[in-house]
Image (tube, rainbow, N blue to C red):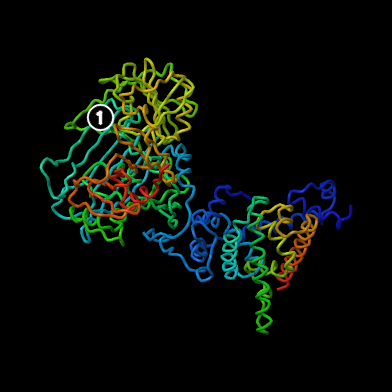
Amino acid sequence: MRCERVRPLISAMLDGLPAPGVDLHLEGCADCRQFLADIERLRRAVRIESAETLPDLAPRILARLPRRHPTGWLAPAAGALVGLVIGLLVTGGWTGPTPTLAATVPESVMAGQSRVTELFGSFQVIERIRPGVTRMYEGELAFRSTESVSLILTQASGPPGWLENSTMFIVEEEEALAAGPFPCPSFDGCEGADPFRRLTVGRDPFSVVTPAPLDLVVPVDVFRNSSIPPALPARVIAGREAIGVELIASQTRPLLDALFGLGNWREIHDTDLVHVWLDREYLVPLGLAVIAVQSDDRAVWAARRGFIDPSSTPYLELTYSEVGFEGGPAIEVQIEGGDTVVDAGYRPAAIGDAPVSAAMPIVAAGRLEGAVPSDVWAWSDGRAWIRLDRAADWQGPGLFGNLDGVVSPIALPGGTGYRAADGSAIYIHGIDQDLAISGSVGYEELLELAESLLVAGQPVPANWPESTAGVTEGVDLVVITDLSGFTAPITKKVGDALVIDLVGSGSRAARITQQPGDFLRPPFDPDARAVAVRGTVGRFSPSLGLLEWAEAGVVVSVASSQLSVTELIEIANALARP
Amino acid sequence: MEEPEPALIRAAAAGDQGAFAELVRAYQGQVWRFLRHLLGDPALAEDVTQETFIRVFLKLRTFHFRSKFSTWVFSVARNAGIDAIRSRNRRVRLAEGLVPLTATAGGLDRSLELETAIATLSPKLREAFLLVEVMGMRYHEVAGVLKIPEGTVKSRVFHARSHLIAWMRADIEDADEM
């Protein structure tokens, strides 16, 4: 072959294309060997020369993006190149919402919870009582799957004379240590508000009595059943890309309680806004801001507590400064002499004939002693977990393991089961055993375990509150509009009243009660006031979270301690006659 | 070249700015290097890189996963780059006497030398060469970006290399003569 014909082949060969016969030619041709050496040298030169770095253009590019409406595809010409407020990308500061979508956050949180097997980090908390009256905290969180968690909050500054509000909560295997002051609304001292240290031994896995603050790892309880939350601008927190969403405080309770459930913190109003920024990869909450939503009812609430909460500044803020996902510190419960010790009664046992959970490895088996002894099994992967409780001698009067939840019957291969309205548990009332299946995972995974057990589930006795015997007759008003953010309504008859329960994410819930009647009884709440609802005049009692009105021979109430009057009226307006 | 997760692209297409920022960070370096060589001007390349990603953002919903995402991004970058060259040429014609960037003299600085050599390539040869050498693209991917047959890519890359080698050799000889 001639050199002119070989050289294009040498060039292509350098780029990984087959070049038959070229090797042979190269052996005998010094010029072509030089050509190959030259183009290789050229490649090295281009690549070395190209390795220089460029400043991150992302903030500038984001600033130049046209604004979009959440549902549509934009953009009025005038708004096309409006710069977004992206100062926070650099400073990590707080800012108001801008319209973007974080449509996949709820499903990502549910699906991504097994991804985090370890987490550690430090963060700052700012707590504002009123302008100029602020407490600051340094926080440390460490988590290791399956259920080892350490949350330590140390007060760094605050008004003089106030009780120190430093808290500690550590869970490790069957031990848990909780330490901190008792709540004291006056902040500067209350009778019996001395700090306590309580050690729990014999703690059961994924205990409901001393729950590990797992929503700080991945906020599963917050986003279970969540509708798509409005998006906030992305932030970089602790060097991590964080996506922001706007929630309501009542929905965010599992996360807020995980942080502020222990100690002497200011109260959070259920209707306030909570901005949450989640690590894009691991869905760990890296930033949090609680912002007051002004309303007459909230003004009364704040005045009674001495809070002044301008909407311009979050009254609670959390921001991580460092975060890591592997190689964190050891977690151990440090016991001191004066600790109060409580035995929760759990005794681990050999994992023998455990039922098989399709989804995750089994991590614990044991027996929970107490008034009604039960067997306990737990499965876990990362932050995700499932627990099965079995009692042999349960007498009621209600489903075993169901503390106060709303349930609806479901069909299982062996008979009947009951599904918690929020999808977080399944209960089975068997002939000689009662079962409760609970977990952080989605309902489908719980159902898989429930179905694999093949227990002959029976309908509960008619005198248990979960019984649905007698419902369906006399329905006056039913919810027909799809209420975004709530699971399917659960209807039951209690005496002559028809009760409809609505369950949303977090602690959001409402109960609609209908009774025969033509007028409202005198109010219990001295702050009750008139409101317009369904074309008539109704009454709202702020301290009870109760909206009431009379309509066509029926007195209807919508009650919720977590929802605002606006949301209660929305629910009322969604009711319709069959 | 590593491809982003389809979910990330979809999130960005739905307007999620965090997701879009992640895409920008994944490709900005390569896009900028490509444009810098294509345009021969680092500062202009930075502007056109920004322009590229704004176009990407606006067109994201039309991306249907029929080609690789990186290929698609580079076609957008290439079009933005060509637009910039056209508008620069117009400006150069308007301001006669302005020294075009392509005429920057070679010097002792190796990178500047190479920069200058690449700038002397015709745009067609330059973009094919850059997509292969700087972006590490395969011929069939370059063919997709430039919408030309694979064989044409092969020959353009070969001619670009031959030209650059000759240019660099001449440069070495010049230096020897001094």
Q: Give the labeled residue for mark 1.
A: A200
Q: Position of residue B126 (x, y in %)?
A: 71, 64
* Apparent side of residue A496 relative to residue A239 in the rendered image (left or right): left
Q: Amino acid at mark 1?
A: Thr
* Apparent side of residue A215 relative to residue A195 in the rendered image (left or right): right
Crowd around label 1: few <14 · some 14–19 · many ≥20 (10 Å): many
Mark 1 falls within which chain?
Answer: A
In this view, A33 is above or below A465: below
Count of labels in the image: 1
Q: Position of residue A540 (x, y in %)?
A: 26, 50
Q: Position of residue A76 (x, y in %)?
A: 53, 68
Out of B77 and A560, give the one closest to the viewer: A560
Residue at the spot 40% in from the left edge and 40% down from the top edge:
A220
Instruction: Say if residue A66 shows up in the picture.
Output: yes
Instruction: Say if residue A289 shows up in the picture.
Output: no
In this view, A147 is above or below A301: above
In this view, B13 is above or below A340: below
Q: Which residue is farthest top? A: A432
